[in-house]
Image (cartoon, helix red, strand yellow):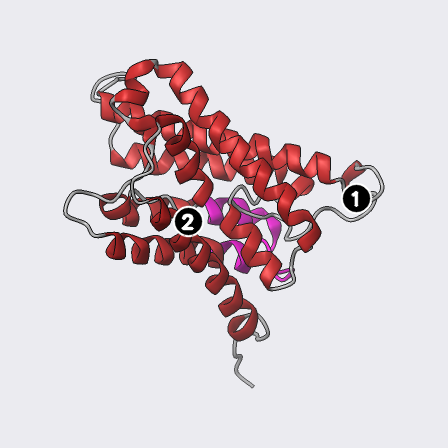
Amino acid sequence: MAAIRATPPAPGSAGQPAGPSQARAGAAELIGTFFLVYAGTATAASAHLGETIAGDPADSLAIALAFGFVLTAMVAALGQVSGAHLNGAVTLGLAVTKRFPWKFVPTYLVAQLLGAVLGAAATWATLGNPARTQAQLGATFPAPGVSDIRAVVVEALITFLLVFVIIATAGDDRVTHAVSAPAIGFALVAAVLIGGPVSGGAANPDRALGPMILAGNFTSLWVYLVGPLVGGVVAAVVYDRFVSKTTPPSAD
């Protein structure tokens, strides 16, 4: 879902084999998306089922923090290998603005979706059948009384927030990499807190689709494809065209 680097590592960098490897980058995207979806959906399903760690059941804040914490960890762990996009909206936004090679896009999209499906499967294995039958494996759907139109707008807005922060921090050489991972994790926490009561706060087509596939419930699927993809691409274009090529004003 994020990107310490906007492109795969340069030849021979960070001890990597010469030349970017689609297989290695795809494996990193699969692993990162797996843990992102597993941590977030397991927490969401536990909260729905009323399972406890100690004391009161996990609540909405715990869900947002789980997604944000694991994203921060995966960005720090895998950014040097694949860029740690972990989100098809990030990959497409970077490709549209020529910050990521199109030839890598299919590999990333397939790896991200497979990682999301496996992450949902791990939630099922961890919490048992009630996680699927009652909690829908943490899948996101519009809240009762919320129209698909309102939900898709919210998904576009929160994905814009996430991708804008990703590109502004991890995709800009003027920003130190030390701040990228926590900034991106915080942005996802905010996105989930904003979108959660309305659309479930996916901000990621893979995070939405993986649990839907295994739960067999595709309610309002288009919301979680169109909203994040549009929001991600628009965020990338806005930063690239209107924000990136400037510096803060200073007094003479």
Task: Determine the residue positioned at 53% across, 46% down.
Answer: 2
User: Where residue 99 sits: x, y (%)?
Assistant: 65, 59
Which numbered disc covers residue 72?
A: none
Q: Residues within 10 Å of mark 1 (few under 14, many from 20)?
A: some
Q: Is residue 234 above or below residue 114?
A: below
Q: Is residue 62 left or right of residue 234?
A: left
Q: Is residue 88 left or right of residue 205?
A: right
Q: Quadrant of residue 134?
A: top left
Which numbered disc covers residue 13?
A: 1
User: Where residue 203 sits: x, y (%)?
Assistant: 40, 48
Magenta-highlighted stretch: main secondary structure? Answer: helix
Is 34 part of what is drawn in magenta? no
Residue type highlighted by circle 2: Leu
**C-beta proximity under 8 Å, tags 2 and 1:** no
User: Where residue 147 sits: x, y (%)?
Assistant: 21, 52
In depth, the one of 210 and 68 nearer the eye is 210
- Mark closer to the observer (2, 1): 2
Is 172 part of what is drawn in magenta? yes
Residues in magenta, as a range: 165-185
Task: Determine the residue positioned at 41% across, 36% down.
Answer: 67
Circle 2 residue: 225
Query: Going by the picture, which residue comes out furthest to the left?
Result: 145
